[in-house]
Amino acid sequence: DVVMTQSPLSLPVTLGQPASISCRSSQGLESSDGNTYLHWFQQRPGQSPRRLIYRVSNRDSGVPDRFSGSGSGTDFTLKISRVEAEDVGVYYCMQGTHWPWTFGRGTKVEIK
Amino acid sequence: EVQLVESGGGLVQPGESLRLSCAASGFTVSNNYLSWVRQAPGRGLECVSVIDISGGVYYADSVKGRFTISRDNSKNTLHLQMNSLRSDDTAVYYCARGGASHWGQGTLVTVSS
């Protein structure tokens, strides 16, 4: 199985400051169709996960533009340009290129 | 608007069975990948099964041979038949569309004697 390694696992941030989460995969995630199925999810306390970014860098509808994704191969990053109070939660990366689809362990974002 | 509504969770004893359902609206299940993702209490996310557009099915090793994913196109509904349940199957089970673009609210399955 492809192992997704996120870091850090805990991220205390100051409101208005940037935040960055790294996700590394144990195998390359480019599919035979040329797409890279690396997605990012946010799970607020008590809620279902919500997809923020699909295929590395595409924001889902309704996602604020302070969220951005980048990367290629085995190294990927989610950035929040200016953290707001509503961004508190756990963030997961997920690869959907190789079966079984696998998630990172999650990064807990909290306000300092 | 895309909506997914899971049902069928509950408390069962080890070895028993349960069938989860996920009613979809706003899209057609037969034209989409659909998946079941679970989250054990206080833990991360695990994709346990996927059904693709052609009806191909995929299972995580942890549930292979015990769980069966299916869809009812006439009712626009996804199912997960879970047999021989174990305590480590205890989790909230979510159904999700496509590359997990949309998620339901989840249904809790508790396996305990």
Image: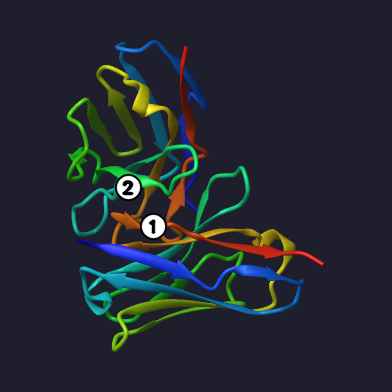
Residue A38 percent across, percent down from the top left: 31, 45
Residue type at mark 1?
His
Position of A31 with respect to B39 (left or right) is left
Label 1 secondary element: loop
Point 33% across, 81% down: residue = B55
Q: Specify the subunit that label 1 lies on.
A: A
Badge 1: residue crowd in 10 Å (few <14, some 14–19, many ≥20): some
Residue B53 percent across, percent down from the top left: 27, 76
Residue type at mark 2?
Leu
Q: Where residue B51 is drawn, which disc sits there?
A: none
- Relative to A58, does residue B90 appear above or below in the rendering? below
Asked whether disc 1 touches disc 2, contact meaning CB atoms under 8 Å apart, the reply is: yes
Where does label 1 land, which residue? Answer: A98
Q: Nearer the viewer, residue A70 or A30?
A: A70
Q: Quadrant of the C terminus of chain B?
A: bottom right
Q: Does residue A45 show up?
A: yes
Q: Where residue A29 is drawn, which disc sits there?
A: 2
Residue A7 percent across, percent down from the top left: 47, 26
Point 20% across, 61% down: residue = B1
Q: Earlier in the sequence, mark 1 or mark 2?
A: 2
